[in-house]
């Protein structure tokens, strides 16, 4: 997977289509606190997308993780998440919300947390304050101590 690179991208129709096709949210993509990335192959084909929303100095929300259908089940999703996490501050707590992919994120180091364990900055994001259903699983990255 060395030929794959994570590159910053702007919100685009391609990003919106990829997320919509995967059943992911697109209502809150815009914002200066959000960064998006494309996992790009050596031949410039996009393999997938990811994003992070900076909520405050101590917490970020991993969001918009999608691997395009033709690349699924080949390990690209984990690689995409790991490269995206490398773009976050090592001291930041990383959270995500999912309705279907908790089992995908667990081997990467995410664990389910209760809402009362989630910082207000994360809970006040549009995703967690209204767009995601209350039944969504909230997960936190369990980073080893530094």
Image (spheres, rainbow, N blue to C red):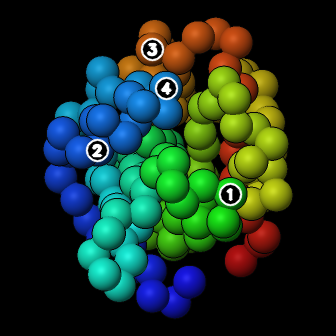
Residue at image mark 1: 73
Residue 141 appears at what percent x and percent y? 70, 53
Residue at image mark 3: 131
**Of the residues under marks 2 and 3, which one precedes in the sequence?**
2
**Of the residues under marks 3 and 4, which one precedes in the sequence?**
4
Residue 11 seen by the camera: yes
Residue 55 seen by the camera: no
Residue 6 appears at what percent x and percent y? 38, 72
Circles 1 and 2 in contact, beta carbons < 8 Å: no
Q: Separation of disc 3 and disc 4 at Cα? A: 13 Å
Q: Secondary structure at mark 4?
A: loop
Circles 1 and 3 in contact, beta carbons < 8 Å: no
Q: Separation of disc 4 and disc 1 at Cα? A: 17 Å
Q: Separation of disc 4 and disc 2 at Cα? A: 12 Å
Residue at image mark 4: 23
Front label number (4 vs 1)? 1
Q: Separation of disc 2 and disc 3 at Cα? A: 18 Å
Front label number (2 vs 3)? 2
Q: Secondary structure at mark 1?
A: loop
Whether residue 134 sits left or right of residue 112 in the image: it is: left
Front label number (1 vs 3)? 1
Residue drawn at 31 percent across, 53 percent down? 36
Examine the rendered structure and indicate whether residue 139 appears above or below residue 86: above
């Amino acid at each position: 997977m060395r030929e794959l690179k994570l590159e910053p991208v702007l919100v685009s129709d391609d990003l919106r289509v990829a997320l919509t096709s995967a059943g992911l949210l697109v209502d809150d993509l815009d914002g200066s606190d959000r960064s998006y990335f494309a996992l790009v192959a050596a031949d410039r084909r996009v393999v997938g997308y990811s994003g992070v929303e900076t909520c405050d100095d101590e917490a970020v929300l991993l969001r918009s993780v999608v691997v395009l259908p033709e690349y699924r089940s080949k390990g690209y999703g984990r690689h995409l998440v790991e490269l995206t996490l490398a773009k976050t501050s090592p001291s930041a707590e990383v959270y995500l919300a999912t309705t279907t992919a908790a089992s995908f994120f667990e081997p990467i180091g995410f664990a389910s947390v209760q809402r009362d364990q989630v910082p207000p900055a994360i809970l006040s994001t549009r995703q967690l304050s209204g767009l995601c259903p209350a039944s969504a699983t909230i997960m936190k990255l369990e980073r080893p101590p530094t």
